[in-house]
Amino acid sequence: MSDDIWKFQPTAGYRAGVDLVGYRVEAIDGHIGKIDKHSEVTDAAHLVVDTGVWIFGKHVLLPVGTIERIDATTKTVYVNRTKEQIKRAPEYDAAKHAGEPSYLEQFARYYDRPHM
C-alpha cells in the first residue's frame, strides 16, 4: 500500500492553505458532487465529497492522491477515478473517522488497488 495516495501529486496544482470546500468534483466520466470537507493532515490528506442526488446523498472520501488537477478559476477538482469506482468505494462515516485511528486504511486499500 502506498503512502502517496494521501499526498497531493506535484502536478495537481494544489497550494497549501487553499480551501477546496465548495469546489465541484469531476470524475474521469463526469460530475460527482461538491467538496464538503477538506483535510490537509500530513499522510492522511483527503476530501469528503457530497454526491447529492447522484448516489442518494452519499458522502464519499477521496484521498488527495486521486486528484489529477485543480482548476482554481472554475473551482473544479478533477480526479483520476470513474464515477462507478467512486460509487463502489467504502461508505464514509464521520463518527468512525473521528474515533478509529485505522479507519482510513480501508480507503487506502480500495483506492490504491491497481485494477479497480
Image (spheres, rainbow, N blue to C red):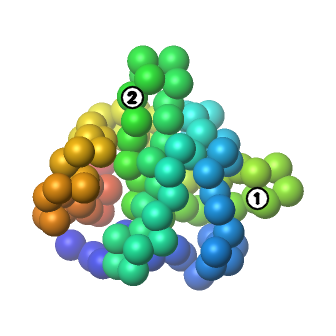
Which residue in the protein does label 1 denote? 71
Instruction: Residue at 45%, 48% (x, y): give it.
Output: 48
Q: Residue furthest right?
A: 73
Tell me where residue 10 sits by quadrant: bottom right
Within 10 Å of disc 1 (Cα), the crowding (few <14, some 14-19, many 20+) is: some
Lateral position of residue 76 relative to residue 110, left or right: right
Lateral position of residue 35 relative to residue 84, left or right: right
Within 10 Å of disc 2 (Cα), the crowding (few <14, some 14-19, many 20+) is: some
> Which quadrant of the figure contains the N terminus?
bottom left
Where does residue 71 sit, x and y in percent of width and height?
76, 59
Helix, strand or loop at disc 1? strand
Where does residue 33 sit, x and y in percent of width and height?
57, 35
Tell me where residue 68 sits by quadrant: bottom right
Instruction: Residue at 65%, 62% (x, y): give it.
Output: 19
* Amino acid type assigned to the residue bearing label 2 in the image: Lys
Q: Pick the residue in front: 84 or 89.
A: 89
Q: Pick the residue in front: 86 or 62.
A: 62
* Amino acid type assigned to the residue bearing label 1 in the image: Asp
